Image: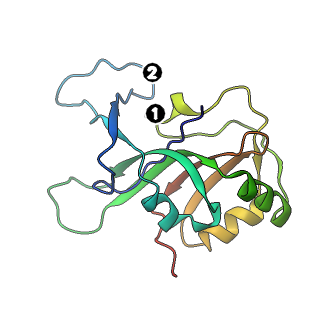
Amino acid sequence: MLVAALTLITGCGSGEADTASVRSPAGSSARSPETAEPEQTIERDKDPVLERFPEFGDITAVEWVTREFGRPSEMAGPTDFRVSGVAQLAKADTERLQQEHDWVPAEEAPATLEGISPRVPKGVAWEVSGGFTAQVTGGAFEATFFLDPKAGVMVFDAVNPSVANP
């Protein structure tokens, strides 16, 4: 059973969550309390994902995490955030995405927030589509999308993804 992971805005969870430690870029999880990064909560609520990425279609499972960056939390104003996740797509939507967009083999594996990276399937022939990415982002934010067409798994990583207009 594949569990999907996605990181979105804090507070958009479904109440179903578990916690994953975040490690430093060097791979060490040992930090002093003053420099320790907060733990990332794994969310499973589909709605925040579909609000930002309706092009995915029907998601049968999803896991995601979010991390804010760029300013201290006690300062007022907009907050930049990064969201990473893994979504299990319905078979019909996987087929639709393959027909609507040109997908090519990815040159590298997906890069995600560390709270999600253990949930990204290994040994997969990932595919990417510039057309799909352009359609989803509309040039308004940066994101990467990796599709495993055999398993119907989409790995995504985005900075400040906007809610799609209805």
Kindly give the residue lying farthest to the bottom in the view shown: 166
Q: Which residue in the rendered view is the most extreme toward the left?
A: 74
Q: Residues within 10 Å of mark 2 (few under 14, many from 20)?
A: few
Instruction: Find the distance from the CA under tag 1 to the CA under tag 2.
Output: 10 Å
* Residue labelled with disc 1: 114
**Residue 91 in the image: x percent, y percent?**
73, 51
166 is higher (above) or lower (below) than 115: below
Q: Nearer the viewer, mark 1 or mark 2?
A: 1
Pinpoint residue 136: horizontal percent, then vertical percent: 63, 67
Q: Which residue is located at x 31 percent, y 62 percent?
A: 79
The front one of 1 and 40 is 1
SS at badge 2? loop
Name the residue that disc number 2 marks: 27
Inspect the image, locate mark 2, and give the three-letter code of the amino acid beneath it.
Gly
How many callouts does the rendering have? 2
Q: Earlier in the sequence, mark 1 or mark 2?
A: 2
Residue positioned 17% across, 66% down in the render = 76
Counting from the top left corner in percent of width and height, residue 139 is at 61, 72
Residue at horizontal 55 percent and vertical 72 percent from the top:
140
In-image side of 95 versus 116 (left or right): right
Residue type of the residue flagged with mark 1: Glu
